[in-house]
Amino acid sequence: MKKYFRRSYVLRYLVIVLVLCVTAMGMTIMRLSQMGTEPFSCLNYAISEHFHVPMGMTIIVINLVLLVFTYLNMKESLGFGTFANMFLIGNFADFWMKILKPILSPFATTMISRLFMLCIGMVIMVFACSFYLAGMLGMAPYDSFAYVLEKMTKGKFPFKWARVFTDSLCVFIAFLIARTNRTQWQIIGIGTIIMAFFIGPLLSFFRERIADPFMKMLKNLPS
């Protein structure tokens, strides 16, 4: 147990919490752009608005369901990061919505400003998420889902394309749920489609070139 309290581990724990906070900020900026958010958040927003429950609670419930599947097929992917994601990112999103909505909503009045917000939120979210995955301290059940598919197919369905599949499935389900309230085009937009097809490749790009080397440096720090 002592190794989990070494400086390298403690710093990685702190980085994980920080990047979850930054990831939630990116999610919120995308949501406020009114041009769609990333697929899994899109599903959570649809369920949250349909059942009138906080985003934090929605993410916890959905991830608990996915946690069972992950535990049965890839328990080695579980760790500090798994539970930090489940219990923090949704609450961080609720926090950022309260802070950023009164600041950014007045600017989301033109297509150019909304596109700018969308791009900023997208880059922030994917960049931060790459550090979360590179931390190797456990992945959120949803993030590990694509890796489980890769494992189950023995690499024939690589992560980046498995992620495209799971993200596209989230968008489809979110559309069906949000359509009942006629809010589907408020949470699903061009940003959602872009993220559904490019979040996997972008995550791989940021991990290989920036996040993995940085987290490896922290991991190799002396006690």
Image (tube, rainbow, N blue to C red):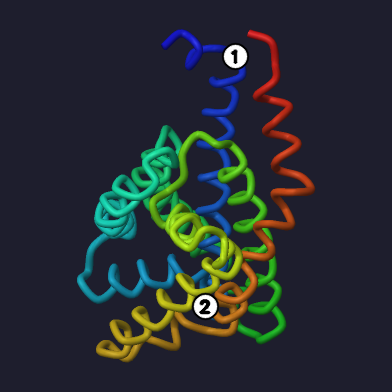
Which class describes the residues within 10 Å of circle 2: few (<14), some (14-19), or many (20+)?
many
Q: Is residue 101 above or below residue 191?
A: above
Q: How far across and how far down the image is residue 71, in percent?
A: 31, 45
- Give the quadrant of residue 108: bottom right
Residue under the image location 31 percent in, 87 percent down:
176
Identify which amino acid the numbered label 1 is placed on.
Arg
Q: Which mark is residue 25?
A: none
Distance of label 1 from label 2 (alpha carbons): 39 Å
Residue under the image location 43 percent in, 66 percent down:
41
Q: Which quadrant holds the N terminus?
A: top left
Q: How far across and how far down the image is residue 211, in percent?
A: 70, 43
Question: Would residue 31 be visible to someone looking at this image?
Answer: no
Q: Is residue 174 above or below residue 134?
A: below
6 left or right, relative to 54: right
Label 1: element kind: helix
171 left or right, relative to 216: left
Q: Nearer the viewer, residue 2 or 101?
A: 2
Residue under the image location 69 percent in, 70 percent down:
119
Q: How far across and how far down the image is residue 30, in percent?
A: 56, 69
Q: How far across and how far down the image is residue 162, in percent?
A: 52, 67
Q: Which mark is residue 36?
A: 2
Question: Would residue 144 be visible to someone looking at this image?
Answer: yes
Q: Which quadrant holds the C terminus?
A: top right
Identify which amino acid the numbered label 2 is placed on.
Gly
Earlier residue among tags 1 and 2: 1
Q: Nearer the viewer, residue 76 or 125?
A: 76
Please name the residue that numbered disc 1 is placed on. 7
Q: Is residue 177 above or below residue 14?
A: below
89 left or right, relative to 36: left
Which class describes the residues within 10 Å of circle 1: few (<14), some (14-19), or many (20+)?
some
